[in-house]
Image (spheres, helix red, strand yellow):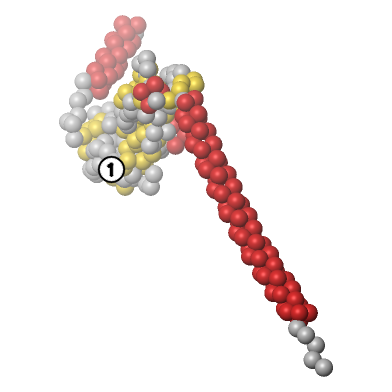
Amino acid sequence: MISGGNSLTAAVLLLIMMKVFSVLTLSCPSTMYQAQEDLCCPKCPAGNRVKTDCTKTANTSCVACEGGTHMDKPSGLKQCIHCTICDPRFGLKENRTCTSTLDTICEPQDGFYCVGLAAGSCVAAHEHRQCQPGEYIKQTGTALRDTECSDCSNGTFSDGTLKFCWPHRVCESLNLKLITPGNATTDAQCEEQDHHKVVLISIGCFFLLLLSAILIALCVIKKKSMCLNRDEKTSVCLTKVKKTKNEEGKTEGEPLNN
């Protein structure tokens, strides 16, 4: 009895091992998937998922992916894959909208560059670097590369928004006086030379003196004109007085007629 029982147990174990071995060695074609231990089923086409597996008498049942999901290739999956969301909080925006057969493709927002790619889609982006005062934009940032900045050399300056550094003004060459030397962030400050001020003051004084002379000349001319008018009036008066006296003298000299 014991010997018979051992033989039965060995036979059962052998059958189990053969079954497991057959499952492990089962290989389905690329157009099919393994549904049961010893059954390969046809895959559902892109844009679809498996509703029910095939049987020995029925083919695989497929159903289209619902909105917001996709399946980009034939498969034996029973759930479609959720569409990728381009999260603006991560500096992303849509480049291609998700369909039942294609996933969303994301790209960096304007002013951002991609720091992670997966299947041709950006998964994370960082904002472009802002060049600081004293630096210039050596290389403008793109969707795949950050902005590259570089320091201004001696004798030049930039506020950080330029693609080159401006040379400082040379006040002496402009016949100006240097007030504040330039640095990497600001230009040199100049002002007019002192002799320019002297020239301006001298010109102002000249015109002031000229105006005074004109006013004095006008006053003298007016005064002379007034004096001439007064002399003419005085002469007329004297002539009238003399004439009156002569007439009176003639009157006194005539004899009286009886």
Left or right: residue 4 compared with residue 236: left
**Residue that appears at 50% across and 29% down:** 198
Q: Which residue is mark 1?
A: 101
Left or right: residue 152 compared with residue 191: left
Residue that protrudes farthest toward the right in the picture:
258
Residue that protrudes farthest toward the top in the picture:
3
Q: Position of residue 102 (x, y in %)?
A: 29, 41
Q: Is residue 13 above or below residue 35?
A: above
In the picture, which quadrant includes the C terminus?
Answer: bottom right
Q: Is residue 146 above or below residue 223?
A: above
Q: Is residue 210 above or below residue 1?
A: below
Specify whether residue 181 is in view. Answer: yes
**Residue that appears at 24% across and 29% down:** 38
In the picture, which quadrant includes the N terminus?
Answer: top left
Query: Nearest the camera: 181 or 248?
Result: 248
**Residue that appears at 24% across and 32% down:** 33
**Residue that appears at 66% across and 66% down:** 235
Rendered image quadrant of residue 231: bottom right
Residue that protrudes farthest toward the left in the picture:
29
Q: Position of residue 155 (x, y in %)?
A: 37, 17
Rendered image quadrant of residue 93: top left
Give the SS element for disc 1. Answer: loop
Query: Nearest the camera: 164 or 244?
Result: 244
Specify whether residue 52 is in view. Answer: no
Which amino acid lies under the numbered mark 1 shown in the image of this protein? Thr
Rendered image quadrant of residue 147: top left
